[in-house]
Image (cartoon, helix red, strand yellow):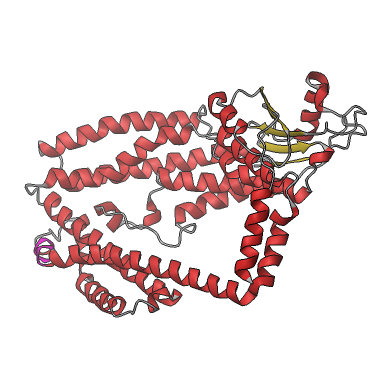
């Protein structure tokens, strides 16, 4: 029965109409769309019925009503978009509207192309992630493509019908299929985790004797050396635990790898081995740097790497939408970056000439990274003040930023393979990557709290009796 149903559905689908837009009209008043990409893509989209496609963009404000603006623009610039009686959108018309500044997206259509509020929200949801990432052209294409799928969709292609049909064909079969898919996905994930663990475990095992020799010559009198040695004291115990986990995961049968509890076991093994692999590198670097061994420069470069990465990522952070790149706190970050790049060269030269000790160089690096964390915290307040409209929104954003810094937004914190990352807790340094994660989550949370997933259906005070099908939402 199921196979017969599939054949029937495929036959219906093949018979469904597929026609390109009658016309594509782009009114990009915001100046954010790439026409060379947009027009060919929209002209190639297939609708179920001949449809005129309009794309309208303008730069508004967060408090604007996009529905009202689209109607105003149509009345003044394109009255042909409106029905003869002035009360609806013209037949055969679909409008995709975008306000990149006010962060709104809207969909409007003639009565003969009418969609439910849920379907209009579906179109906007399809574009939302791309629009949040400022991918205006791709977001517009995605929204129009989804509209083409839904407008005048044949009944036999609707989700409700397909679900009902498949349920009729056999709920048990679907359940078994879903179970098999879940098991296959879990099994694949388990294998990847075991492979990750095996690579790290092999590195640790191969270097085990060297690691012990390195640890034996780390100066315990050094403040940093003593902290690394403290971590080393549990190294062999942790290695033995990782060995036990390795034996357990490799004893699992192919079928049992598809169980969730064994994926958890495989992940525990991989995390344990990966952290040991990073720690033995830190032990080697501590020995080389603190004793000024032949590879001290390579070890020092590895200590600088996380700080260099932060400095390199600052401009991208400050140039983000709502990143407050023209603020005083942004200027302080840029000034710090430029000075720090000069400082790094000076510290390295001082180390090479033995004008400072390795401990002093690490102290300077610690102070610089702590200073960066403070400047980022100051800039976080600038961003919050600029984006939040009230105390509740500010507190929500602040909570997300703090959660990112404390690692609460991540199931597993990555271990920083550096001396400072070993000596100090992971939340000690507010990195640019962590800041960006908190920033994105904070803006998204506030946007959702403002009704980013809700819809506005009215046309405002200037709309009068206009009742065309359409709605908008925030992103």
Q: Nearer the viewer, residue 338 or 260?
A: 260
Q: Which residues are magenta?
A: 209-214
x, y percent for residue 86? 90, 28
Is residue 213 rendered magenta in the image?
yes
Q: Nearer the viewer, residue 118 or 264?
A: 118
84 vs 225, left or right, is: right
Q: Quadrant of the C terminus?
A: top right
Residue at the far top in the pictured view: 77
x, y percent for residue 107? 73, 38
Residue 339 falls in image quadrant: top left
Is residue 369 rendered magenta in the image?
no
Total label count? 0
Q: Is residue 288 above or below residue 17?
A: below
Residue 469 falls in image quadrant: top right
Q: Residue at x 41, y 47 (%)?
A: 430
Q: Is residue 399 above or below residue 250?
A: above
163 vs 354, left or right, is: right
Q: Is residue 1 above or below residue 363?
A: below
416 vs 82, left or right, is: left
Q: Nearer the viewer, residue 350 or 115?
A: 115
404 vs 422, left or right, is: right
Q: Is residue 57 visible?
A: no
Q: Residue at x 55, y 51 (%)?
A: 400
x, y percent for residue 367? 32, 43
Q: How would you classify the magenta stretch by its main secondary structure?
A: helix
Q: Is residue 41 above or below residue 273?
A: above
Q: Is residue 79 visible?
A: yes
Q: Residue at x 80, y 32 (%)?
A: 68
Q: Quadrant of the N terminus?
A: bottom right
Q: Nearer the viewer, residue 314 or 145?
A: 145
Q: Residue at x 12, y 66 (%)?
A: 212
Residue 234 falls in image quadrant: bottom left
């Amino acid at each position: 029965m199921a196979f017969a149903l599939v054949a029937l559905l495929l036959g219906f689908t093949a018979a469904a109409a597929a026609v390109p837009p009658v016309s594509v009209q782009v009114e990009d008043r915001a100046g954010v769309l790439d026409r060379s990409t947009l027009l060919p893509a929209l002209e190639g989209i297939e609708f179920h019925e001949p449809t005129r496609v309009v794309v309208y963009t303008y730069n508004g404000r967060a408090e604007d009503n996009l529905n009202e603006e689209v109607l105003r623009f149509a009345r003044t610039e394109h009255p042909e978009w409106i029905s003869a009686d002035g009360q609806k959108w013209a037949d055969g018309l679909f409008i995709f509207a975008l306000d990149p500044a006010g962060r709104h997206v809207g969909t409007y259509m003639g009565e003969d192309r009418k969609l439910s509020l849920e379907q209009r929200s579906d179109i906007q949801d399809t574009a939302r992630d791309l629009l949040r990432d400022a991918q205006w052209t791709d977001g517009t294409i995605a929204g129009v493509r989804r509209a083409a799928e839904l407008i005048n969709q044949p009944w036999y292609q609707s989700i409700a019908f397909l679900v009902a049909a498949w349920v009729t064909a056999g709920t048990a079969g679907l359940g078994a299929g879903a179970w098999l898919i879940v098991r296959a996905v879990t099994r694949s994930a388990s294998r990847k985790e075991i492979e990750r663990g095996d690579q790290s475990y092999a590195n640790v095992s191969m270097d085990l004797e060297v690691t012990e020799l390195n640890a034996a010559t780390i100066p315990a009198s050094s403040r940093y050396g003593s902290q690394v040695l403290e971590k080393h004291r549990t190294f062999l115990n942790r290695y033995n635990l990782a060995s036990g986990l390795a034996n357990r995961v490799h004893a699992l049968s192919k079928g049992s790898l598809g169980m969730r509890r064994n994926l958890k076991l495989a992940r525990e093994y991989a995390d344990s081995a990966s952290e040991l692999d990073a720690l033995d590198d830190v032990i080697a670097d501590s020995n080389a740097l603190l004793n000024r061994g032949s590879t001290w420069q390579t070890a020092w470069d590895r200590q600088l790497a996380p700080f260099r990465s932060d400095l390199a990522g600052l401009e991208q952070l400050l140039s983000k939408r709502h990143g407050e790149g023209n603020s005083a706190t942004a200027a302080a970050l840029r000034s710090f970056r430029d000075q720090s790049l000069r400082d790094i060269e000076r510290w390295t030269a001082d180390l090479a000439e033995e004008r400072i000790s390795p401990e002093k160089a690490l102290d300077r690096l610690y102070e610089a990274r702590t200073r960066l964390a403070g400047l980022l915290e100051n800039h976080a307040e600038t961003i919050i003040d600029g984006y939040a409209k009230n105390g509740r929104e500010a507190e929500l954003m602040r909570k997300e930023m703090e959660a990112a810094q404390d690692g609460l937004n991540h199931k597993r914190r990555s271990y920083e393979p550096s001396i400072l990352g070993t000596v100090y807790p992971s939340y000690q340094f507010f990195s640019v990557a962590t800041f960006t994660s908190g920033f994105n989550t904070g803006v998204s949370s506030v946007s959702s709290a403002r009704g980013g997933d809700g819809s506005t259906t009215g046309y405002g005070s200037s709309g009068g009796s206009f009742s065309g099908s359409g709605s908008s939402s925030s992103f």
